[in-house]
Image: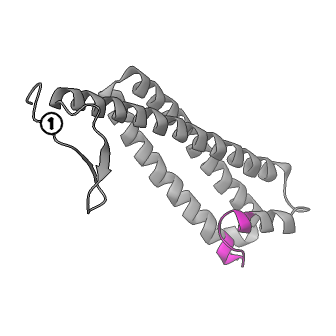
Amino acid sequence: MTASNRHPLATLSQLLSQELAVAGDLLQVLDHERDALTREDPQGIEATTMDKQQLMVQLRELLTRRDAFLMERGYSTGKPGMDAILKELAADLSDDTQTLWQSLGQVAGKLRDSNDTNGILVSLAQRQTRQALEILTGRTGQQQTYGPGGNQVAGVSAQTLAKV
């Protein structure tokens, strides 16, 4: 028997613990990203984007390992498989494993909320930039329509305020 077959619950707890640690790090990076977005700090945004990408790779690898763990034992992947294994092995599980799974779910919700908030900040910044460009090019107040390719198209103004 391999170590993972002898102690599958220890392996599961270890995987969940690693996921929780990386998810917590990602939550901190999203907080730093929000701060950089509100300060309009391009270097900060770039640094957090790189950190976020690295953590997402780590998290994806851990999720793949957890899914492989579940599949090796005949469970489906993702939340359904985790719910099934936790239910089936409830008597053998330590409270730590249940707590780790619940904590991971809570952090996942915080990650979603934080990512949504940052997305809203990015959208607002894009809208402000687009409005500034419209003012500089003299295209303010024109209705946006969609062209044949699905791209937004604005009517052209004959008067340009500035050239870049």
Query: Quadrant of residue 122 in the image?
Result: top left
Q: Residue at x 21, y 34 (%)?
A: 139
Q: Nearer the viewer, residue 124 or 139?
A: 139
Residue 97 forms part of the magenta stretch: no
Rendering coords of residue 147 (x, y %) = 26, 57
Q: Nearer the viewer, residue 8 or 51?
A: 51
Q: Main secondary structure of the magenta part?
A: helix
Q: Which residue is mark 1?
A: 157
Q: Nearer the viewer, residue 2 or 130?
A: 130
Rendering coords of residue 127 (x, y %) = 36, 34
| Res 2 visible | no
| Res 120 visible | yes
Rendering coords of residue 111 (x, y %) = 59, 42
Rendering coords of residue 162 (x, y %) = 10, 26
Q: Is residue 124 left or right of residue 72?
A: left
Look at label 1 and name its amino acid.
Ser
Type of colouring: one colour
Q: Is residue 152 left or right of residue 155?
A: right
Q: Nearer the viewer, residue 29 or 162?
A: 162
Q: Residue at x 47, y 46 (%)?
A: 55
Q: Residue at x 21, y 43 (%)?
A: 155
Which segment is the magenta one? 70-82
Q: Is residue 20 above or below residue 78?
A: above
Residue count near mark 1 (Cα–Cα under 10 Å), binned few <14, some 14–19, many ≥20:
few
